[in-house]
Amino acid sequence: MPVRLPFRPRRDTYPPDLWTKCPGCSEMLFNKQLEKTLRVCPHCGHHFRISARSRIEQLVDGGSFVERDDDLQPVDSLGFVDLKSYPDRLVAAQLATGLRDAAVWGLAAMGGKPVSMCVMDFGFIGGSMGAVVGEKVARAGEAALDQRIPLIIVSSSGGARMQEGTYALMQLAKTMGVIERLKAACVPFISVLTDPTTGGVFASFAVVGDVNIAEPNAIIRFAGDRVSAGTIGEELPPGYQRSEFWFSHGFVDRIVARARLRDEVIALLGFLAAPPPAGAGEAIAGIASRPRSLLSALTGALAGENGDARGSDARGGDARNGGRNGDSRNGGRGGEANGSRGEAPRG
Ligand SMILES: [Zn+2]
């Protein structure tokens, strides 16, 4: 029979799952409180890394996320072994995160608008991009293209997954191929860069969004300090690999705190909409995706040339006409001149 002590033994330390020490200000933060602030330190604003599932929960309309391809599973094509074998690493990461690989993608709604979303999870082998992550990004892009809905990718990655060697590197080309097709079809792509976005993910899809949003003070870079400084043979300025530096150099369009991220993306979705596929839908929907075209059309309408302006924009919205550049050139001029310019590339 077990002996029952009248008092519980006194604990010398707090249970580790109750408190988290903030790396920004060294304050001890109560985990329940931290969850309420979306894992942002209320004292210094440090943004903790969060899982893909939490990110999705924070961004999309409640209950709207429908995951796709959750059964995709990485394979060890190279028989790769470092300190551990790759399959052992995969199993450990799968047990720790409850994911099969470092990305989750699916269809969801944000502010009532349908979106295709892919979110990376740094907790799974550093969010590294192997064949499965690349495939999920590509499929999210293809779904956005098929359904003409905006693509949103939230990156959090150490780069290409070395255990998959060349297969991992090939994901850069694969993902960029899809993004280029999206751009040609004028389907919006919002890229959210979170801490950290580095290596092959930085070097491919993460920084080519129509709008690149970063969380405050996130590490965004291709390579580490030593490699970067060694490559160019120069000392690098302090903080050169943080969101604020990229923002001040025009590489990142917005720095948005996590608490405002959802509202910010929803607001952007109000400005960005994919035009309907060629030959379908209302011409006016094509105008809505391009503020400058919209302004030109409105100018035309005020001058009594509404019909002309609309017609030209519908042609400009056609993916085969060469996408955004051609379109913004047309859009900037407006009025009847648009009609002839819109026609020219078609012939
Ligand atoms: Zn703090």
Image (spheres, helix red, strand yellow):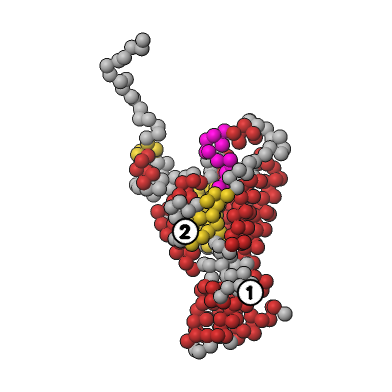
Cβ–Cβ under 8 Å for marks 1 and 2: no
Q: Is residue 273 visible?
A: yes
Work out which residue is located at the far left of the displayed protein and give it.
6
The residue lying at 59 percent from left, 62 percent from top is: 147
> What is the quadrant of the C terminus in the image?
bottom right
The disc label shown at residue 279, or none: 1
Q: Nearer the viewer, residue 167 or 158?
A: 167
What is the number of callouts on the image?
2
**Magenta-drawn stretch contains 338:** no
Whole-percent x, y for residue 132 in the image: 63, 45
**Magenta-drawn stretch contains 103:** yes
Residue type at mark 1 is Gly
Q: Is residue 247 visible?
A: no
What residue would you read off at disc 2?
A: 110
Instruction: Find residue 266 and report its image quarter.
Output: bottom left
The residue lying at 48 percent from left, 57 percent from top is: 109
Whole-percent x, y for residue 63 in the image: 45, 51
